[in-house]
Image: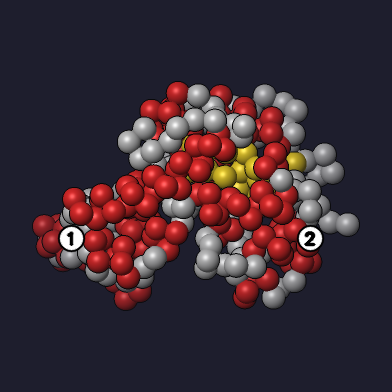
Amino acid sequence: MANSPNFMIIGAMKCATSTLHEQLALQPGIVMTEPKEPNFFSNNEEYQRGIDWYLSLFTEAQATDICGESSTHYTKLPTYPETVSRIAAEFPELKFIYVMRHPIDRLVSQYIHEWTEGVISVDINEAIDQFPQLIEYSLYTRQLAPYFQQFGQSMVLPVFFERLLTESQSELERICSFVGYGDVPRWNFDLDAQNVSQERIRRSEWRDFLVEAPILKQLRRLFIPKSLRTWVRSLWTMKQKPQLTPEKLARLQEIFDQDLTILGSWLGTDLTCDTFKNIVKKDALTWR
């Protein structure tokens, strides 16, 4: 049988899963898929390719290698409801890594991502009402519960974005120990953070063609002043970080505090939106 995954990074979206994927891929003896997010078990169009296609993503791995993939769609309920049952049917003893982030920060980062992709065009305060997935994907216990029920709590490692940034090496060691890696991993601090939407530039097919076409690129630099090019670029750029109104912020805190109360009980601590960052940075939390 072809090599198959030993573990999956299942999310959450906009929680440094791309960075973690790349850091793991740098470790000798760990093979991570290319592409990073196969989305095989979540997306119907990918699932229809069949399990042989999925297993082909691991054909370069040696028999002793540990294999993994990272698909944040795997914790996007209710968007992809069949994910967990599909995984369990193929790999009933798999291990999972779930990276969480302050739920409001994660929501804002997802909003920026969706805005740049052209999925969302309204203000963030309107978007929260129009796009329920912004909230759903930050309700971590709802995303985790099906994995606990199907695979058991011990098969899911909780990781937190905020601690991963400040304690990168020790968190990488903890993650590698969880997946059964026998060597000491090394976090590469020279590797830039992956998939960071700092510039917040909206995608545009015709603009990207004009920008990337080699001949047009040279002509633009020769004949169009930089000040004009900068102004045109600004038309597709989010001018400032989205700002939640006090009313929307209070509503989100109420929603997420309910979910964090449950998450905290699973972790043996008291979690709220106000305490989240201090608590998750302080210690490596595990299920109680």
Residue 189 appears in the rendering: no
Say which quadrant the C terminus sits in.
top right
* Precedes in sequence: disc 2 or disc 1: 2
Q: Secondary structure at mark 1?
A: helix
Give the residue pinned by disc 2. 90
* Left or right placement of residue 85 versus residue 174 in this view: right
Q: Position of residue 253 (x, y in %)?
A: 32, 47
Give whichever of 63, 119 is nearer the camera. 119
Quadrant for the N terminus in the image: bottom right
Residue type at mark 1 is Ser
Q: Residue at x 55, y 54 (%)?
A: 143
Q: Is residue 217 left or right of residue 71?
A: left
- Residue 21: give x, y in percent of width and height: 57, 44
Residue kind at label 2, given as amino acid type: Glu
Say whether residue 2 is left or right of residue 144: right
Residue 52: image quadrant is bottom right
Q: Measuring 53% from the left and 54% from the top, which residue is drawn there?
A: 142
Give the percent coordinates (x, y) of residue 148: 66, 48
Q: Which residue is mark 1?
A: 234
Mark 2 crowd level (few <14, some 14–19, many ≥20, 10 Å Cα): few
Which residue is at the front of the view, 251 or 168?
251
Q: Is residue 239 visible?
A: yes
